[in-house]
């Protein structure tokens, strides 16, 4: 069986972090400058008691309500996050219960970040193609804000929290809407450039790891916080994303120019603009959704898809999805809406 | 070259007329975000990727140019 994206919904926590809030903290940056550089005005931030599991479950509930979907009709739940509620058990099992899914349905977590939605979509497609499921619910949610030091503007200006829900259904071979081919890539040599160094089994949190350090740009963080080497990530992206797109073109025979939309991971405006120019993509084919949510990691592509689906569901318009970042990990695919 | 200097002016938020080889970057907003933007600019203008750490250490526009030239094998 082929598969298609049927419905998309999103959920944002209530707390907002505005550029005015950030400008008050970082004296050398005005609210206008932050917007001009990042393309972001506001980020939604999870509350102290609010987890990625909560955001994902709320996104799932919204999808069921907005699109009149029966929870018991879901055969498999894939939850993509890098901020699970527990080391164990699997957060997807807890969400499965909250959403009232069938006991005879599967539920797994996928630990992947900016590329995670595209990876999850490939797994959903595989489950459907193998006959193991007819309806797969993909949930994405991250709360990077909990990893970020409040005085680290290199990441605090960019990342926001959100959850998204994407329903993937089996369809017959004559469907105009379908999920197409994928290409993948991985380079663990870049792991150190976007990382929370402590808290896992490799390096435990300790008094020493929690010591705050000032970097040369005036940012403060400890080993327990998210660290991003912005210039390395930019170099990686400018090299890898165009190659992944060329690989997908070669594999499928569809040129980038023949596609109706290019949906990139919404990292930040300057990176997206650099990629758009490098790949000669006209702005009208390059939808963005950053301004009022920031970089929401695994949810950025579903958030853009939510807008596209509202206008074009069932149209058969061709979108290229490209996820790239933490890992390093990347993936690209075709989706006919 | 003017595309590169114009781009640098935009990144540093100064007039393009003020961007010269001798411009002292240590007196400008040559911060981590500027360096990230400059990596994209150099990729756009010259089709090459320069090392971010080396770029951040450049004290003048000439040193940035030298870094680009070295990478281009000039």
Image (cartoon, coloured by chain):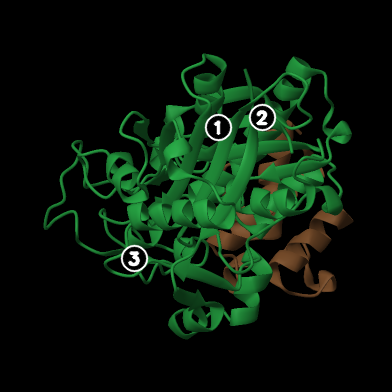
In which quadrant of the rendered image does the C terminus of chain A lie?
top right
Q: Describe residue B63's horizontal placement relative to residue B15 as left or right.
A: left
Secondary structure under tag 3 reads: loop
Q: Which of A14 and A63 is in front in this view?
A: A63
- Real-space CA distance between mark 1 and mark 3, rounded to the nearest whole angstrom: 32 Å
On residue A333, which mark appears? 2
Disc 2 chain ID = A
Q: Residue at 36%, 29% (x, y): give it.
A: A106
Secondary structure under tag 1 reads: helix
Disc 3 chain ID = A
**Nearer the N terminus, badge 2 or badge 3?**
3
Q: How crowded is mark 3: few (under 14 residues within 10 Å), some or many (20 or more)?
A: some
Residue that carries the numbered disc 3 in the rendered image: A149
In which quadrant of the rendered image does the N terminus of chain A lie?
top right
On residue A121, which mark appears? 1
**Nearer the N terminus, badge 1 or badge 3?**
1
Residue B12 on image: x %, y %: 69, 69
* The color chain A is rendered in: green
**2 or 3: mark nearer the eye:** 2
- Real-space CA distance between mark 1 and mark 2, rounded to the nearest whole angstrom: 9 Å
Residue A318 on image: x %, y %: 79, 35
Chain letter of the brown region: B
Q: Nearer the viewer, residue A271 or A138?
A: A138
Dots 1, 2 in contact, CB < 8 A: yes
Above or below residue A139? Residue B13 is below
Q: Residue furthest left?
A: A207
Q: How crowded is mark 1: few (under 14 residues within 10 Å), some or many (20 or more)?
A: many
């Amino acid at each position: 069986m082929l598969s298609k994206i049927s419905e998309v919904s999103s959920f944002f926590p209530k707390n907002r972090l505005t550029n005015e809030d950030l400008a008050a903290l970082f004296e050398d940056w005005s609210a206008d400058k932050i917007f001009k550089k990042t393309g972001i005005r506001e980020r939604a931030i999870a509350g102290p008691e609010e987890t990625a599991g909560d955001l994902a479950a709320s996104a799932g509930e919204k999808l069921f309500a907005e699109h009149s979907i029966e929870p018991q009709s879901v055969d498999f739940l894939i939850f993509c996050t890098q901020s699970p509620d527990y080391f164990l058990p699997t957060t997807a099992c807890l969400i499965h219960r909250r959403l009232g899914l069938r006991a005879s349905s599967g539920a797994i977590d996928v630990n992947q970040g900016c590329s995670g939605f595209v990876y999850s979509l490939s797994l959903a497609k595989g489950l459907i193609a193998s006959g193991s499921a007819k309806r797969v619910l993909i949930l994405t949610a991250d709360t990077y804000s909990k990893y970020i030091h409040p005085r680290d503007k290199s990441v605090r200006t960019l990342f926001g929290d959100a959850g998204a829900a994407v329903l993937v259904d089996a369809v017959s071979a004559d469907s105009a809407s379908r999920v197409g081919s994928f290409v993948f890539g991985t380079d663990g040599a870049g792991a150190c450039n976007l990382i929370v160094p402590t808290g896992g089994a490799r390096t435990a949190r300790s008094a020493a790891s929690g010591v705050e350090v000032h970097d040369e740009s005036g940012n403060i963080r400890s080993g327990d916080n998210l660290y991003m080497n912005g210039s390395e990530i930019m170099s990686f992206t400018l090299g890898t994303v165009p190659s992944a797109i060329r690989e997908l073109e070669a594999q499928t025979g569809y040129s980038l120019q023949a596609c109706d939309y290019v949906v990139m991971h919404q990292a930040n405006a300057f990176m997206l603009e650099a990629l758009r120019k490098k790949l000669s993509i006209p702005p009208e084919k390059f939808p963005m959704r950053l301004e009022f949510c920031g970089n929401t990691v695994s949810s950025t592509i579903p958030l853009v898809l939510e807008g596209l689906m509202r206008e074009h569901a069932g149209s058969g318009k061709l979108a290229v999805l490209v996820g790239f970042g933490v890992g390093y990990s990347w993936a690209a695919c075709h989706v006919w809406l | 070259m003017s595309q590169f200097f114009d781009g640098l002016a935009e990144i540093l938020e100064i007039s393009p007329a003020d961007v010269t080889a001798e411009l002292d970057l240590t007196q400008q907003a040559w911060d981590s975000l500027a360096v990230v933007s400059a990596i994209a600019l150099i990729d756009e203008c010259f089709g090459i990727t320069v090392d971010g750490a080396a770029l951040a250490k450049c004290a003048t526009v000439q040193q940035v140019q030298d870094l680009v030239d070295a990478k281009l094998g000039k």
